[in-house]
């Protein structure tokens, strides 16, 4: 069939600046202007839409909307409604049809079969062979060399890569991020700034830690240096050895993809350390009360104040006096130590 067979069939003089090369290319165009079709049946169904470019067999074959670009066999082949879509590669955006002129706009697919199964959606970008092929309906996603989730729909998501084992990004290391948040990553590769969530709505079986935190008392902090292949600067480090921590409590370590012990859950260690501190604090409070009660029964009155010495350190000063005029004073950098010093003097 002749290319541009029906061009300006209405006689309105609107079908200007069109180019068609190939059997049945833009064959039904009547009033559309500024279109380019190169390839058999490229822009086959276009009648009145403007400014489309189709290069390849069946590219934009069923299109009836404006401002779309398709390069490659079957690119945007099924699209009817929706504008400003770009497809480059065999069968890229092949299934996009659109449910209305207000939907299925501004999609970009670069690579063979990129977004090939997408039927409806806005502002999606997929780069790479088979990028985003799992998606059927979605909006505002970015996929680079990633086929998408194990589901047919998601929105507002970025997915980069598939199967790579290392990532290098310039412009991050050494840069300030004032008032920013640390970034965490799950085993599935999802990034986020909250790990783990602390709200009770995410938790179950909540109960006091009690003696569970005593495991950290068996941990052995060490100083070390990473091997130079991991840290060329070879600076001194402070921390724990994951294999030793595993012997104390296996729940305090993380493992790599092969199941080997890799690192320590320092966030959990910190929580356990807080529990031990609070337990110790309560014991100290009880001991202070015992000391105070014993001295009171013996006719002594106790007092305590804190001060800052000439080197900027906080010191505690305790004193005791009795009705007979006897007085004792002790100083220490810890409150309990000062109390005990006074008690020993008495």
Image (cartoon, helix red, strand yellow):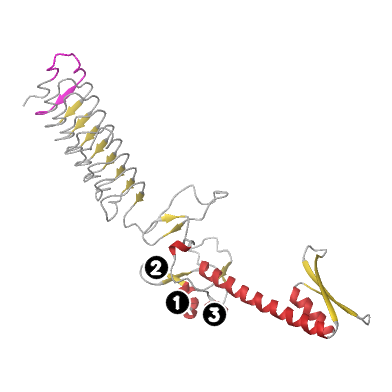
The residue drawn where x is 55% and y is 79% is 214
The residue drawn where x is 77% and y is 82% is 293
Q: Nearer the viewer, mark 2 or mark 1?
A: 1
> Residue 4: x and y, percent?
12, 22
Mark 3–mark 1 distance (CA, rounded to whole Å):
16 Å
> Residue 179: x and y, percent?
57, 50
**Residue 144 placement, left or right of 118:** right
Mark 2–mark 3 distance (CA, rounded to whole Å):
29 Å
Residue 344 visible here? yes
Disc 3: which residue: 211
| Quarter where residue 56 is shown | top left
Q: Earlier in the sequence, mark 2 or mark 1?
A: 1
Q: Secondary structure at mark 2?
A: loop
Q: Nearer the viewer, mark 2 or mark 3?
A: 3
**Residue 1 placement, left or right of 154:** left
- Residues in magenta, as a range: 7-24
Mark 1 burial class by Cα count in 10 Å: few <14, some 14-19, many 20+: some
- The foreground one among 69 and 83 is 83
The residue drawn where x is 38% and y is 57% is 189
Q: What residue occupies the far right of the structure in this picture? A: 325
Disc 2: which residue: 256
| Quarter where residue 98 is shown | top left
Q: Earlier in the sequence, mark 2 or mark 3?
A: 3
Residue 277 on the magenta segment: no
């Amino acid at each position: 069939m002749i290319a541009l067979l029906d061009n300006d069939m209405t006689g309105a003089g609107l079908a200007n600046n069109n180019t068609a090369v190939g059997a049945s290319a833009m064959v039904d165009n009547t009033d559309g202007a500024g279109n380019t079709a190169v390839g058999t049946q490229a822009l086959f169904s276009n009648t009145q839409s403007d400014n489309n470019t189709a290069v390849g067999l069946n590219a934009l074959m069923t299109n009836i909307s404006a401002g779309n670009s398709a390069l490659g066999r079957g690119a945007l082949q099924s699209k009817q409604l929706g504008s400003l879509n770009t497809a480059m590669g065999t069968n890229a955006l092949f299934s996009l049809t659109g449910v209305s002129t207000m939907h299925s706009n501004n999609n970009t697919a670069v690579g063979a079969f990129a977004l090939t199964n997408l039927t409806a959606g806005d502002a999606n970008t997929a780069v790479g062979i088979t990028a985003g092929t799992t998606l059927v309906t979605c909006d505002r996603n970015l996929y680079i060399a990633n086929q998408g989730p194990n589901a047919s729909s998601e929105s507002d998501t970025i997915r980069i890569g598939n199967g790579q084992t290392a990532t290098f990004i310039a412009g991050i290391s050494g840069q300030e991020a004032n008032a920013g948040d640390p970034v965490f990553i799950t085993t599935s590769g999802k990034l986020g700034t909250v790990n783990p969530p602390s709200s009770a709505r995410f938790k179950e079986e909540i109960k006091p830690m009690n003696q569970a935190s005593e495991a950290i008392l068996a941990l052995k902090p060490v100083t070390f240096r990473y091997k130079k292949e991991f840290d060329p600067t070879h600076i001194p480090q402070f921390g724990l050895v994951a294999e030793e921590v595993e012997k104390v409590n296996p729940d305090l370590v993380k493992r790599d993809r092969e199941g080997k012990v890799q690192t320590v859950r320092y966030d959990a260690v910190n929580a356990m350390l807080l529990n031990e501190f609070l337990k110790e604090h309560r014991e100290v409070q009880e001991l202070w009360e015992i000391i105070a009660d014993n001295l009171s029964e013996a006719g002594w009155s106790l007092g305590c104040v804190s001060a800052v010495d000439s080197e900027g350190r906080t010191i505690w000063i305790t004193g005791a006096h009795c009705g007979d005029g006897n007085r004792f004073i002790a100083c220490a950098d810890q409150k309990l130590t000062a109390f005990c010093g006074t008690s020993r003097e008495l």
